[in-house]
Image: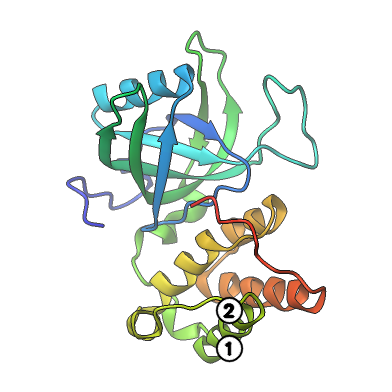
Amino acid sequence: MPMNAVYRGPADLPAIIPVFPLPGALLLPRGQMPLNIFEPRYLAMVDDALRGSHRLIGMIQPDTGHPGPEEKPNLYKVGCVGRITQLAESGDGRYVLQLTGVCRYRVEHELGVTTAYRQCQVDYVPFADDFVARKGEQEVDRKTLLAALNDFLKANNLKADWEGIENAPNEALVNALAMMSPYGPAEKQALLEAPDLKTRAEILVAVTEIELAKGFTGTEPPLQ
């Protein structure tokens, strides 16, 4: 998804961003995530993001291992910031929007704010390679990844657009499969925090093989 804004490195992004905690949601650089926004605090978050110059929202998962209070769950330390690249009003008070991933970030600390939504000061420097499109593609074991995908599809009696899959570059393929995968928050977080594309593909294959060995079937539709 092309963007009107160009982000060349960490200095092009704001240090303080609104964050949207959502269990099981995985956004990756240059990936697209559809969102259906209906809670008043997140409607306000979108309005404020649109009023600003960056139109950015930080996706992040609640930390399932250290949940904290229900009204304000603890967050994982790593998320991914995305730019609002599509938005439609539903007519019934909702926003239907699409985020395009820009860069992962590490939470330095959460701010005490008066807004209903949460805001964090973040650091993008540990993930500076996210600004380089298709970095590390040649290291991905595409054959093994496609074999795991084929096994998963067969086990779940699903079909896929193999022509589109075979034509997809490795970065787009790995990240799309990771984002659409029906695995749990811990697995999604591991995919997010993978240091490079090769490792992300290896984690995806390993998780798929483990779940298939346990007789897993993806009966629930993916969040994205």
Q: Residues within 10 Å of mark 1 (few under 14, many from 20)?
A: few
Q: Is residue 189 above or below residue 98?
A: below
Q: Is residue 51 above or below residue 129?
A: above
Residue 41 horizontal/vertical position (percent): 47, 18
Task: Name the mark on residue 153.
Answer: 2
Q: Residue at x 67, y 79 (%)?
A: 155
Q: Residue at x 72, y 79 (%)?
A: 209
Q: What is the three-letter code of the residue carrying label 1?
A: Ala
Q: Is residue 188 visible?
A: yes
Residue matched to label 1: 147
Q: Residue at x 58, y 33 (%)?
A: 108
Q: Residues within 10 Å of mark 2 (few under 14, many from 20)?
A: some
Q: What is the three-letter code of the residue carrying label 2?
A: Leu
Viewed as shown, does residue 55 lie left or right of 166? left
**Quick one: 109 or 62, which is closer to the camera?**
62
Q: Residue at x 34, y 66 (%)?
A: 133
